Image (spheres, grey):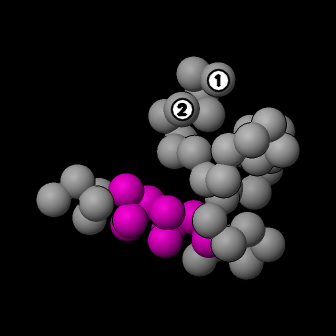
Amino acid sequence: MLSKQPSRRVVALPLSMPSTPAKPAGTEPRATPKGAPAPPPGRIAVG
């Protein structure tokens, strides 16, 4: 049930930015090298 909501957001981001296979480009690329494979937009803002 919950997997449908995050799946839509993750798919909508890469569609606009082919540079990122599962992460928004320009939002917060620092979260990736920190050790997060693909954190949600909510966690990126908190981190």
Residue 23 pos. (x, y %): 66, 58
The numbered mark at residue 15 is none
Vertical arrangement, residue 33 with respect to residue 24, above or below: above
Q: Are marks 1 and 2 in contact (CB under 8 Å)?
A: yes
Residue 28 visible in this rendered orientation of the protein:
no
Task: Determine the secondary structure under disc 1.
Answer: loop
Task: Determine the secondary structure under disc 2.
Answer: helix
Q: Residue at x 37, y 56 (%)?
A: 6
Residue 21 pos. (x, y %): 68, 72
Q: Which residues are magenta?
A: 6-14
Task: Describe residue 39's horizontal placement relative to residue 26 as left or right.
Answer: left
Going by the numbered disc 2, the residue's amino acid type is Arg
Foreground of the two, 25 or 30: 30
Q: Residue at x 75, y 57 (%)?
A: 25
The answer to if 5 sits in the magenta stretch is no
Going by the numbered disc 1, the residue's amino acid type is Gly
Asked which quadrant contains residue 44, the reply is top right
Main SS of the magenta segment?
A: helix
Residue 34 pos. (x, y %): 79, 37
Asked which quadrant contains residue 27, the reply is top right
Residue 16 pos. (x, y %): 64, 72
Where does label 2 land, which residue?
43
Q: Quadrant of the C terminus?
A: top right
Foreground of the two, 42 or 34: 34
Q: CA distance from mark 1 to mark 2?
A: 6 Å
Residue 42 visible in this rendered orientation of the protein:
yes
Q: Residue furthest left?
A: 1
Instruction: Give the crowd class for mark 2: few <14, some 14-19, many >=20 residues within 10 Å.
Output: few
Asked which quadrant contains residue 8, the reply is bottom left
Where does label 1 land, which residue?
47
